[in-house]
Image (cartoon, grey):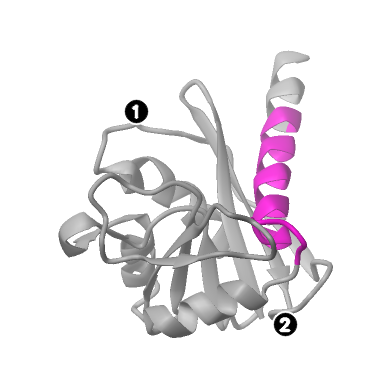
Amino acid sequence: MYICLDAAYESSIGLACGVIFDSIGSQKPAKVITGRKLKVKPYIPGKFYERELPLLLSVLERVEEDLNIIFIDGYVWLPGNRPGLGAHLFKSQNEKIPVIGIAKNLFKGHRECLKVYRRKSSRPLFITSAGISIKSAAKIVEKLHGQNRVPYMVTLSHIMAQKALDEKLNRHQSR
């Protein structure tokens, strides 16, 4: 099984969602898991993991399936081989589940990532990984389902995280 994780924020509140699917070519999720609504730290450049890691972990603690790979919307490694969100996530899982980072924008000065051009897009995705070679990670990202630049499950995890956060905030406001 595979999972794409993403988080959504509203002010100092955040919530993450995981889209679980059973093969690289899966066209639909097997399950969607929502984490807990949490108060998040402010964004600090280079320390994004402090803001988002607790949200992602709140999803992973609810996963019952054995995972082969975790995909995140972002970087595993930052320039200079500094650990990013994905590296911290990999470490939190006792370095047993590979993590593949799929970033839509180049982190300034990053030279350790691989560019992947999906489908007919002229804009690349920037791939980093832990627990799996970066070349293998790039090949997997190329094979993920979806006709667009960003793989379908990555997009779906983003949409579902935002939807879940909106629902939680609307329920809270209506009380």
Q: For this view, does 45 lie left or right of residue 9?
A: left
Instruction: Identify which residue, 37 or 149, lies in the foreground.
Output: 149
Q: Earlier in the sequence, mark 1 or mark 2?
A: 2
Q: Position of residue 136 (x, y in %)?
A: 47, 85
Name the residue at 51% across, 57% down.
124
Q: Which mark is residue 42?
A: 1
Q: Quadrant of the C terminus?
A: top right
Q: Residue 27 vs residue 115: left or right? A: right
Q: Which mark is residue 23?
A: 2
Q: Is residue 64 visible?
A: no
Q: Residue furthest right?
A: 28
Which SS type dominates the magenta stretch? helix
Q: Which residues are magenta?
A: 146-167
Q: Residues within 10 Å of mark 2 (few under 14, many from 20)?
A: some
**In the depicted structure, whether residue 129 falls above or below residue 152:** below
| Identity, as a three-letter code, of the amino acid under mark 1 | Pro
Q: Residue at x 62, y 68 (%)?
A: 3
Where residue 129 sits in the image (x, y, percent)?
A: 39, 72
